[in-house]
Amino acid sequence: MRTLIVGVGGMTNGGKTTLSQSLNQQIPHSCIIAQDTYFKDDSVVPVDSNGFKQYDMLSALHMDQMMSDVNLWRKDPGAFLKGRSPTHTVGNEVYLLIVEGFLIFNYRPLNELLERRYFIEIPYDVCETRRSSRVYTPPDPPGYFEGHVWPMYLKNRKEMESAVSGIVFLDGLLSKEELLSVVYKDVIKKLQEIKEKNEKD
């Protein structure tokens, strides 16, 4: 089976989901596994000394469940895609998995499966403005962004950069179309390489 797994990471409200969904719409035989869908129940997420819920940590996520789903896709991407889209027909395609999330590069078992890594970054003030315009459940308490979200982003990014190579950093201030164009061209090129290699073998 011919497959490609790419990771779309970045800070909160950087544009990860928008880019991932656009890629999914543009590239046939692709699907998304999004890290945000694996958060543990709010009741078990710990609180720090400032009273802030510790969501921006791997321990707040069911990473074992996420890996299980990624491995289900790896085992049979055609069947996985058909389970999500019953009209999908299985053939001799190159299948693309888009793994999207804010801590995907910090989890080694997942990161090791990624063949392309993209990280969207935006400045502090833009991130804060975008975050304040979003409605979360539960909602962000006063001071949460500057007291927890941003410091944890800096910590997680430092850990990521010390452990992971080959990340393509993207300017999140570019338009959605520009970001999509950059990543789409790179992914399509890689998919074509995989297809050509398999045709020769």
Image (cartoon, rainbow, N blue to C red):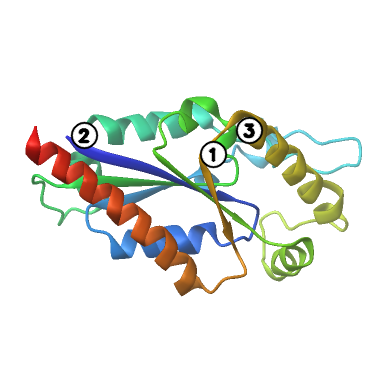
Q: CA distance from mark 2 to mark 3?
A: 27 Å
- Residue with the mark numbered 2: 76
Q: CA distance from mark 1 to mark 2?
A: 22 Å
Q: Residue at 57%, 33% (x, y): give it.
A: 164
Distance, label 3 to label 1, CA atoms, is 9 Å
Callout 2 crowding tier (Cα within 10 Å): few <14, some 14–19, many ≥20: few
Which residue has dot 3 on it? 58
Is residue 200 something that shows in the picture?
yes
Q: Which of the marked residues, 3 or 1, is nearer the chain's N terminus?
A: 3
Q: Could you say where residue 143 lies in the image, as x and y percent from the top left?
A: 88, 56
Q: Earlier in the sequence, mark 2 or mark 3?
A: 3
Dot 1 alpha-carbon crowd within 10 angstroms: few under 14, some 14 to 19, many 20 or more: many
Number of labelled discs?
3
Residue carrying label 1: 104
Of the 4 image quadrants, the one containing the N terminus is top left
Label 3: how many residues lie within 10 Å, few (<14), some (14-19) or many (20+)? some
